[in-house]
């Protein structure tokens, strides 16, 4: 699977397109639609399921140097207002402030990030290290590991500073229950 094929499949879920269009209109700094909603849509296309099957919510990353909770809460409220009438659940996080709350919440280190793609790089699984965003000329795709694991329906751990075996195994078990075709690599796999 190449980038164009991935994007075509991911955008078969109209919610992904709606969100990226709205993020473009809002001009949130360094904003990306990320992770599961993209990969799971592609899995659904590959397995001929409804395009939104198994998707709990839609994750948005952005990077605003204003690390106050009030600023992030304002973005969260704005996005909720824009999408709630359509029944779309969006979880937005300012990547500039994750290091302020993550260590306490998850008991794991989380060094500060410099941009949203740094946050994508720290995802629990390599297969979900993907983000898309609307541009004036179409779409930009960030996928440091490419699309082979997505196309092959492989869940692969992404060991790093905030990796948790328990969290990986719980996420992989949920996915395997929804997509039995998925191959789940062990938490210690390279």
Image (cartoon, rainbow, N blue to C red):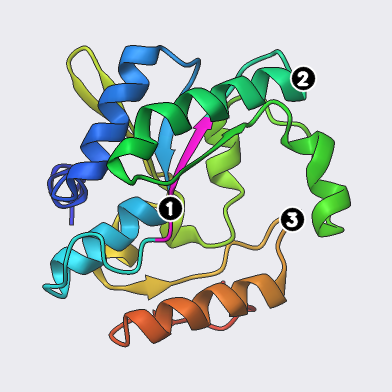
* Residue at horizontal 46 percent and vertical 33 percent from the top: 80
Q: Are marks 2 and 1 in contact (CB under 8 Å)?
A: no
Measuring from the top left, give residue 158's x and y in whole percent.
Answer: 58, 62
SS label for mark 3: loop
- Could you tell which of marks 3 and 2 lies nearer the N-terminus? 2
Q: Main SS type for the magenta part? A: strand
Query: Which callout, 1 or 3, points at the residue further toward the start of the chain?
Result: 1
Q: Which mark is residue 57?
A: 1
* Residue 62 in picture, x, y percent from top left: 53, 26
Give the Cα distance between marks 2 and 1: 24 Å
Residue depicted at x 55% and y 23%: 75
Q: Is residue 101 above or below residue 72?
A: below
Residue marked by disc 2:
68
Q: CA distance from mark 1 to mark 3?
A: 22 Å
Span of residues in magenta: 56-61
Q: Crowding near pointer 1: few (<14 within 10 Å), some, many (20+)?
A: few
Give the left or right position of residue 89, taking residue 152 as reference.
right
Residue indicated by mark 3? 162
The numbered disc on residue 174 is: none
Badge 3 crowding class, 10 Å Cα cut-off, few under 14, some 14 to 19, many 20 or more, is: some
> Would residue 138 appear left or right of 28 to someone viewing this image?
left
User: In x, y percent, where is residue 47?
Assistant: 16, 75
Among numbered discs 2 and 1, the one appearing first in the sequence? 1
């Amino acid at each position: 699977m190449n980038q164009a094929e991935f994007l075509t499949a991911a955008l078969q879920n109209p919610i992904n397109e709606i969100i990226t269009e709205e993020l473009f209109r809002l001009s949130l700094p360094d904003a990306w639609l990320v992770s599961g909603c993209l990969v799971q849509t592609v899995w659904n296309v590959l397995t001929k399921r409804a395009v939104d099957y198994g998707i709990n919510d839609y994750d948005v990353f952005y990077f605003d140097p204003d690390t106050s909770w009030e600023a992030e809460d304002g973005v969260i409220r704005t996005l909720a207002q824009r999408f709630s009438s359509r029944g779309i659940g969006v979880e937005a996080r300012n990547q500039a402030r994750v290091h302020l709350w993550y260590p306490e919440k998850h008991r794991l280190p989380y060094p500060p990030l410099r941009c949203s793609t740094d946050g994508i790089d720290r995802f629990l699984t390599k297969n979900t290290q993907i983000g898309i965003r609307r541009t004036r000329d179409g779409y930009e795709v960030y996928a440091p590991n490419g699309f082979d694991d997505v196309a092959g329906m492989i869940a692969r751990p992404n060991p790093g500073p905030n990796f948790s075996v328990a969290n990986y195994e719980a996420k992989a078990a949920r996915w395997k229950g929804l997509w039995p075709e998925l191959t789940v690599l062990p938490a210690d796999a390279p």
